[in-house]
Image: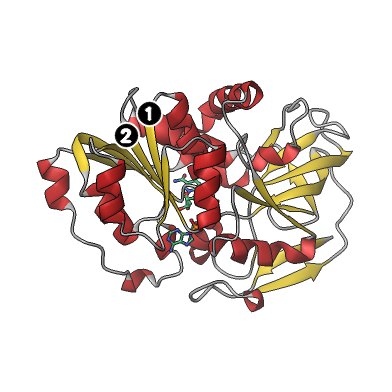
Amino acid sequence: ARKYVVKQHFVGAPKRDDYEIVESDLPPIQNGEILVKTEWVSVDPYIRAYTSRFPVPFDQFSFQVGLVEESKDPRYPVGTRVMSHKGWCDYSIINANVANSPFDMLYKLPDFKGLSSSLGVGALGMPGATAYFGFLEICQPKPGETVVVTGAAGAVGSLVGQIAKIKGCRVIGFAGSDDKVNWLEKDLGFDKAFNYKTVDVQKVLKDAAPKGIDCYFDNVGGEISSIIISQMNDFGRVSVCGSISSYNDDLTNLPKATILQVAIVMKQLKVEGFLVSRWRDRWPEAFADISKWIKSGNLKTREHITEGFENIFDAFLGMLNGDNTGKAVVKV
Ligand code: NDP
């Protein structure tokens, strides 16, 4: 079996040399264990953000979908499709009895009935739950309100914008290329989308959100978030999901963002960060609604698929650099 081992902590952008691919023979499985053949591996921003927290060397974690190939746990017979957090490996041995923390989870993937099982690490997995609960629970959107989403063409952002449309909101998205902007407006039904690399954010928001902004779903942090928050309406809600614009920065040397306290006080904003693990017990609620919306044609999913175990690192780096439209996944 092969796996990616993090051998040194990232400095700035991750480098291929920070990883070693280790090959070994797996031991025979014991009672209570299953042998899983990886089918889909996820590459996500939190991998960049969390890796410095663990002592090296360690096996690269991530969500993944695989098929049970051998089983000594009657609850997971051969042929069962499972979602786990076993990461960038082509085979893994899992003991369901110990895989119950958010960082070491295992569950049976339901039959997606014609949809790709890769959605188990996307719209019908962790990013889907993030978009659903992070937006609906924290922003509490009402029909007719104006919602702004950054990172809008990515895995989470593209779902947030579409859920906001389903809830009757006006939706404005920011993403990093003209192609992404076209996709958001023409295919996903965003009311307006902009390439944050080429527009004056302050100016375009004045035109696109003449009634001000009620909800902001923040995937990126930094200066653009300060500009958006400064244009919010009284009692606006900000869901702070991520801050990818600073993940490669040294935490002791963070870029300066404009001070926002005045806007937060004067407009009585609610600003709340979250981890999607908060709603772990309720993830199936999100998946039920999202799969219903996919089937009814109200919500579209798109994947940026990289093929091959040896290309997982490139897919990860590409995602951090914005190569993906929709969810970045690797077919192993
Ligand atoms: P995406 O699919 O959105 O991929 C990352 C995207 O970030 C890239 O495609 C790129 O798009 C954008 N990006 C990269 N650098 C910058 C930058 N400097 N400024 C602005 N955008 C940038 O990833 P996810 O949907 O999986 O994650 C989106 C966010 O949600 C991340 O911040 C992530 O950490 C967070 N998250 C939080 C969770 C939680 O529990 N709180 C759970 C899951 C995700 P572009 O071309 O537009 O620049």
**Label of residue 221 in the image:** none
Query: Residue 296: horizontal and vertical position, in percent?
Result: 62, 21
Picture layout, residue 309 above or below residue 236: below
Q: Local crowd at mark 1 within 10 Å, few (<14), some, or many (≥20)?
A: many
- Which residue is pictured at 79% across the width and 47% down the height? 39
Query: Residue 249: horizontal and vertical position, in percent?
Result: 41, 71
Inter-mark Cα distance, 2 to 1:
6 Å
Q: Quadrant of the C terminus?
A: bottom right
Contact flag, marks 2 and 1 (Cβ < 8 Å)? yes
Query: Residue 105: horizontal and vertical position, in percent?
Result: 63, 41
User: What residue is shown with label 1?
Assistant: 169
Given residues 113 and 110, the one toward you in this image is 113
User: What residue is shown with label 2?
Assistant: 146
**Residue 73 appears left or right of 57:** right
Badge 2 element: strand
Q: Local crowd at mark 2 within 10 Å, few (<14), some, or many (≥20)?
A: many
Given residues 36 and 238, the one toward you in this image is 238
Picture layout, residue 302 above or below residue 225: above
Q: Earlier in the sequence, mark 2 or mark 1?
A: 2
Q: Quadrant of the N terminus?
A: bottom right
Query: Residue 13: horizontal and vertical position, in percent?
Result: 52, 72
Q: Amino acid at mark 2?
A: Thr
